[in-house]
Amino acid sequence: MRILIVEDDREAATYLVKALREAGHVVEHAHDGDDGAHAVETSEWDVVVMDRMLPKRDGLSIIQEMRGRDDDTPVLVLSALGQVDDRVDGLKAGGDDYLAKPYAVTELLARVEALARRRRPGDVETSYRVGDLVLDRLSHTVTRGGEEVVLQPREYRLLEYLMKNAGQVVTRTMLLENVWDYHFDPQTNVIDVHMSRLRAKIDKDRDRPLLHTVRGAGYMVREAAK
């Protein structure tokens, strides 16, 4: 899933971003209300985790603005204000769930995944299929021919992005930005190493490979011709 964290506490945000990425999600962080408002308006997210009290503008006003333009992206509100009236205010502003600080990251992860499942059918793809390869975004499982394929978090993110763009060439730059969150070329063979590992798990001993290198362009997931 693509998740936006709007949180001004940098230490808490860093820890949360790390935990969500380790769980296999693509995560971006906005550190104040202005950046958060810009991010929700200009990009698509599966879930937004919104701190209530932010510099420059508060989180609830951002949520109200989202709902005013018919943006129904699920929002989990985080706040040190945990009284009943505070939670009611957060939900009335358009939040889908409310979690008081301090919180357990495991609970936050569970709530984020529950919000993604709750979203109306058709609003977000919960699984991708190419041939007999299936990636379930909610359970974070991958199967090929009905058999589970165990992937490391980065391998899962790489496959998820490739399958999201199935049948299209995915460039190395696209992978660096969307899978590794790099906005520069690290001058390493990190992509080649992970593609090699992914091929070994997905295509090894299979009659029809699904992961393809497009020479001079990038990579593609597609079902081979019979």
Image (cartoon, rainbow, N blue to C red):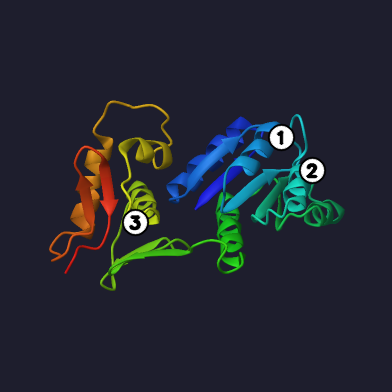
Q: Is residue 14 above or below residue 122?
A: above
| Residue 37 in the image: above or below residue 152 | above
Q: Secondary structure at mark 3?
A: loop
Q: Which residue is mark 2?
A: 61
Sequence-wise, the earlier of marks 2 and 1 is 1
User: In this rendering, would 110 be left or right of 189?
Assistant: right
Up the image or down, 144 lies above or below 7; here it is below
The amino acid on which the numbered mark 2 sits, given as a three-letter code, is: Ser
Which residue type does callout 1 highlight? Gly
State the residue at coordinates (21%, 51%): 212
Name the element at disc 2: helix
Of the image marks 1 and 3, the number of the one nearer the N terminus:
1
Residue placed most toward the observer, 165 or 14: 165
Q: Earlier in the sequence, mark 3 or mark 2?
A: 2
Point out residue 40 in the picture as x, y percentages from the top left corner: 64, 43
Quadrant housing residue 41: top right
Tell me which residue sits at (43%, 36%) in the image: 181
Marks 2 and 1, how far apart in space? 9 Å
Q: Amino acid at mark 3?
A: Ala
Residues at marks 3 and 2, CA–CA distance in whole angstroms: 38 Å
Please state which of the two labelled residues, at mark 3 or mark 2, is closer to the viewer: 3
Q: Nearer the viewer, mark 1 or mark 3?
A: 3
Q: Which mark is residue 166?
A: 3
Query: Picture quarter containing residue 175?
Result: top left
Residue indicated by mark 1: 33
The x and y percentages for residue 32 are 68, 32
Label 2–label 1 contact, CB within 8 A? yes
Q: Position of residue 60 (x, y in %)?
A: 78, 45
